[in-house]
Image: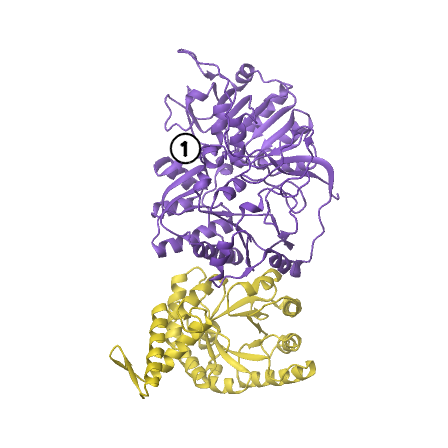
Amino acid sequence: MEKLRRTMLFMPGNNPGMLQDAAILGADSIILDLEDAVSLTEKDSARILVREAIKTIDYSQVEVVVRVNPLDTEFGPQDVDMIARVKPDTLLIPKANEEEIKLVDILLDKIEKEEGYPPGSIKIIALIETALGLENVYNVVQASTRTVGVLLGGEDLTADLGIERTKEGEEIFYARNKVATVCRALKVDAIDTPFTDINDYEGLEKDTAKAKGLGLTGKSAINPRQIETIHSVFAPTEDELKRALRILDAMEEAEKEGKGCCSLDGKMIDAPVINRAACTVDQGIRLGLISGEGGAR
Amino acid sequence: MKTILGREIPDYIEGYGQVRPFQGAFSKVGVKNRTAVKLTSVIPNEHKVLPSLEDALDKLEIADGMTISFHHHLRNGDYVLNIVMERLAARGVKDLTVAASSIFPIHAPLVEHIESGVVSGLVANYISGPVAEAVSRGELKKPAIMQTHGGRARAIESGDLHIDVAFLAAPTADNYGNINGVYGNAACGSLGYAVADAEYADKTIAITDHLVPYPAYPIEISQVFIDYIVKIDSIGDPKGIVSGTTRITKDPVALIIAKRATEVIKASGLVREGMSFQTGAGGTSLAVAAELKKIMQHEGVVGSFASGGITGYLVEMLEEGLFRSLFDVQCFDLKAIESYRDNPTHQFMSASMYGNPHTKGAVVNNLDIMILGATEIDTDFNVNVTTGSSGMIMGGSGGHSDTAAGSKLAIVVTNLMKARLPIIKDKVITVTTPGESIDVVVTERGIAVNPKRVDLLEKLRMTNLPLMTIEELKLLAEKITGVPKGVETSEKIVAVVEYRDGSVIDIVRKVDLVS
């Protein structure tokens, strides 16, 4: 079963207390940040701290992602070299374009070989936060088979576009559409930009619903208190789950009776409806909302 | 001699007397007596207001070896204890026992009186700050007696703790001794902890800075218990008495613990019409109230009462209709004081009504859910809130043991590690509350149910909550922190920890500190 990435929580890579507790905060993935959260004078110590944290702390089921510094800085390649050797689940590559992803892919091939890790076991998520990266996002994802998702960085993208970033987020409508569509086409996760007002839960809920409505599959968070709200938006509702289960039951019945198609509540059930219901039930099982046998809890 | 918990304690402790070892939370119930009270009747035309504290001290005839009492409603803003002790020291009185319901850092001058022999005994439910350190260093002549809120009321009413003179800090008093805590510069709200002192002391004096024309209203403690009244300039600093507003913590780990605790409550089946709830004012405890509020709103449940020390947050829940009533022994903030003064469903509760085990039923007996803190917990679920990780006194039961014993579901909420130290031990340094009263321990990394609560365990197994045994939880912490070395203590007993029924549940020994 593939890992869910409803929430990816950014955590500063230079805070030992937070690194220790990162796994218990409820996020599906944690992003240990060596880039923006760490000042230039602390780049080396944070890198060592994150390496030791990954070696020492049991993050159990939580995906450990490390955001390295941009590959065109002196820190980026050093980050990849030191961190990949302790085998995080995934690297998050900032200001991603094709060249960066290809370069990381080569570095990871070499490190995996040297360390005896299975080839391709360290994954990549591309952080799309430039106009060029956004326009080229299809090729960025295609640049490495390690790529499992795209994270949209709304703040840097709007800065690059020279436009204002607003709470309503109309300015990233196109970017969200583009990322969602490409990711769906290439079957990788599309992770939304964080919502930066950490005390506005209503705004967060609306923003998350907007992203979900456009086809993004998860959202990054910058504070643990945002996780619950994001999960509640991405979780199927009880009604959605019940209906999905009924659809699958009706289909099963129809199959037993040898019918090619069926209907529920007077409406025709066709393949897209069944696929969607199967996705909903699958998500419900993965979230523990229903048991594998299909009974609602 | 051993307690039922296997704690080795002497049969007789010098300065304390014969020891009755703890034999179980409800081993000393049954028919009880209250002590008779000695009083001097007051006839018409007699005046109770005295011109000064000096005049009052002349009249009270305080002699060497007497026990004098204070309440702690003015908390860390209290001036009264310090003023009275300074005057008594100046008069050359020796060997006093100070029975204060709690002692705070503001009472630091007491250390000098301990060193000079003015004070040789202490009885309190909670001690923090310099006095706690002095007791831990072994400077008090007799061992301090650490009680519970309910236990103190029991001790006074039974005569186990005889008070010669009670000094009652009174935010408002009239000239015949009617008292309340809701008006005046030093308003503190409920005076629940002062009631037993007023009713059972040989002499009771009200010390106020807000003397009002007769009669004062409302009346919390009535004129029939008060011998004298004295007005002084100020009885306390409002800034130390109450906090402005109590806020819910933003600490993500504390919030996770609170959320888990609330899920435990929900799974227990106790979220239901008429439910009752108590929690402390600490960060995680208050966050549980916030989480519980969401569930109560979602389920449309109205609780019967919330109790204890009352915060503005519980007042909000009352005003929003989530509880029908509050039982208030002590107000923690201004909002609680205002509500207690103005809202008749926000009711008064004395310490005895709150937690005295030897009454015809304390409020804790009606409590469904209790949220508790812990400094340490051991694998038998015994809780320490009396001494810190170094073995120094830094608190005490307060209402911990009372509510744990009375409630249907006593939940300890705590971080699994605090400041790099694991919280779960093989043996706690000091037992404050026995494990038999604790039902479940909730931490950010796992939940341990007392194996005696098979029913609860079965219910929680139906959820996704991370259940573990307490031993597994302990190992989980030690995997990260390692196993710290035990505290080394000397033979000298510095404090006796009394359970609420008056038996001795543990003793605190002097800690040998590396200087």
Tag 1: residue type?
Val
- Mark 1 residue crowding within 10 angstroms, few (<14) / some (14–19) / many (20+): many
Q: In which quarter of the image is residue A40?
A: bottom right
Residue closer to the observer: B50 or A237: A237
The residue shown at (66%, 45%) is: B429
Residue B136 placement (x, y as % from top left)? 67, 37
Which color mode does the image show? by chain
Q: Which chain is purple?
A: B
Image location (x, y in percent) of residue A138: 47, 86
For the C terminus of chain B, the image quarter is top right
Q: Left or right of A280: which side holds B125?
A: right
Relative to B41, is A125 above or below?
below
Q: Element type at marker 1?
A: loop
**Residue nearer the viewer, A226 or A121:** A121
User: Which residue appears at 64% of the width and 32% of the height?
Assistant: B19
Write down the colour of chain A.
yellow
Q: Name the residue under label 1.
A: B182
Image spot of residue B458 (x, y percent): 49, 58
- Say whether residue B279 is visible: yes
